[in-house]
Amino acid sequence: KSAIVQAYCEKTRTSAKLAEEARRSIAGGVTHDSRYLEPHGIYVERAAGSRKWDVDGNEYVDYSGGHGALLLGHNHPQVVEAVQRQLALGTHYGSSHELEIRWAELVRDMVPSAESVRFTSSGTEATLLALRLARAFTRRTKLVRFVGHFHGWHDHMAFGVGSRFDGSASPGVLAEVASNVRLAPAGDTRGTEQVLDRDDVAAVIIEPTGASWGQLPVLKEFLVELRRMTAEREIVLIFDEVITGFRCSPGGAQQVFGVTPDMTTLAKILAGGLPGGAVAGKQEIMELLDHRAAVDLGSEKISHHGTFNANPLSAAAGVEALRIVSETDACERASTYAQRLREALNEVCQEESVSWTVYGTFSGFHIYTNPEGQAVAREQLDAGSYDPMVLKARPRPKLLMKLRAGMLLHGVEIFVWPGGPTSCVHTDEDLALTVEITTPDVPPEDTA
Ligand code: PMP
């Protein structure tokens, strides 16, 4: 074990014990692939604002941000109060309720493409439903997605990201499913156009700030071109704003870039820290979910169920969170903090002659830990075009694990990208601490 990992293990003994116990009842010991950490992750006991505390009493600045859901930080007092109010009235009615209307109205009023809304219980379900709607609407089969862009883990989207950039099916996914999904190169208009012309395409889905939340950014110009190309071919354009929605701005990335897709998928911030997702979009497409309209259109209604869709607790948290996002400068504050953090960390890298690059857009930061990645990241930001294979230049898993463990050892939790989302409640002290602990004081063998 390296010195870092050893020290981390000593500091997190109770977490280590729980991780061992977890393996006996939880498959693989974790409940989300990204929470896997070697030799073990931390077990969290409580959280507040920008911080969380583990079972050994260690305090951390949190950049996992509830996988991106916590733009407002942990336990925002107004959100907590709204949830507590609802808790006393019931957690789950299995009936319609007024809060879901207020929630949908907020989405409709904030997100430019949202003429109508349907709630789901997660982002994965949202992209699944959006793609089904697009296929039914266009009566076409093929879907186009971009290399490295993440859209959840259902069969249609379970490859072309993380690995399998050739578009082949990952284990458990039917080859027929994969063969109906084409991979296109984001940022490359001509390359994308070729993919769109190969088949009759039902839908194109994209993360509007780039692969895995801007790890490989796309520029506004590409989005404008994509809008043109899809409109010309009557292809449904879906912006997956599960991460960027209510984060880049109250109206998401589409509002900032001034490009309006046909449909938008939402989750995370949408539900204020509780589970929830949504599909929003053009009335004529969303009508396929309408019992009355679908009959009038002479088409069969699209099937959509979900026990916990728009459950009252998520709705209460969501309504409160969206109100705060729309009425305050929460998005701006989170973005400003991220920008300061990126600049400060790059200064450290330069001062210490470490060939890492910290970059990102809006309220996010990514750490590229190898020179290849660094060069491409720079190129990316300058030109907005890239070789998708660069995703392979991500830090090696071992280094990534060590980086995360090393940051935890010093009181900062970053996410697996590596990097993380920032919130509107991160403070100057959080920034100072993050910068201080990132100063490499590790022996050379630990940075390899
Ligand atoms: N789309 C994007 C862009 C995401 O980042 C995620 C989750 N990280 C999803 C979809 C899936 O959302 P969920 O985890 O709620 O299923």
Image: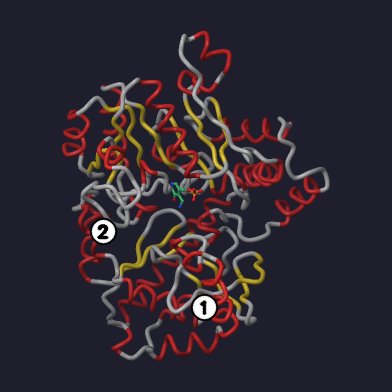
Question: At 57% from the left edge and 32% from the top edge, which residue is drawn?
Answer: 305
Question: Residue 229: x percent and y percent?
Answer: 25, 28
Mark 1 neighbour class, 10 Å CA radius: few under 14, some 14 to 19, many 20 or more: some
Mark closer to the observer (1, 2): 2
Question: Residue 179: x percent and y percent?
Answer: 25, 38
Question: Residue 301: x percent and y percent?
Answer: 51, 19
Judge by depth and name the residue closer to the eye, 174 or 191.
174
User: Seen from this angle, which residue lies furthest front?
Assistant: 24
User: Where on the picture, by quarter, is residue 100?
Assistant: top right
Question: Residue 282: x percent and y percent?
Answer: 47, 23
Question: At 40% from the left edge and 46% from the top edge, which residue is drawn?
Answer: 151
| Amino acid bearing label 1 | Leu
Taking the image as shown, residue 138 lies to the left or right of residue 24, namely: left
First-in-chain label (1 vs 2): 2
Judge by depth and name the residue closer to the eye, 429 or 254.
254
User: Seen from this angle, which residue lies furthest right?
Assistant: 88
Label 2 sits on residue: 391
| Label 1 CB sits under 8 Å from any ligand 1 atom | no
Real-space Cα separation, disc 1 to disc 2, in angstroms: 30 Å
Question: At 24% from the left edge and 62% from the top edge, which residue is drawn?
Answer: 392
Mark 2 neighbour class, 10 Å CA radius: few under 14, some 14 to 19, many 20 or more: many
Q: Please say if 232 is above or below 255.
A: above
Q: Which mark is residue 226?
A: none
Taking the image as shown, residue 401 lies to the left or right of residue 180, namely: right
Q: Please say if 113 is above or below 361.
A: above
Judge by depth and name the residue closer to the eye, 361 or 319.
319
Q: Which mark is residue 433?
A: 1
| Label 2 CB sits under 8 Å from any ligand 1 atom | no
Q: From where the camera sits, is residue 321 visible?
A: yes
| Amino acid bearing label 2 | Leu
Judge by depth and name the residue closer to the eye, 311 or 185.
311
What is the count of numbered marks?
2
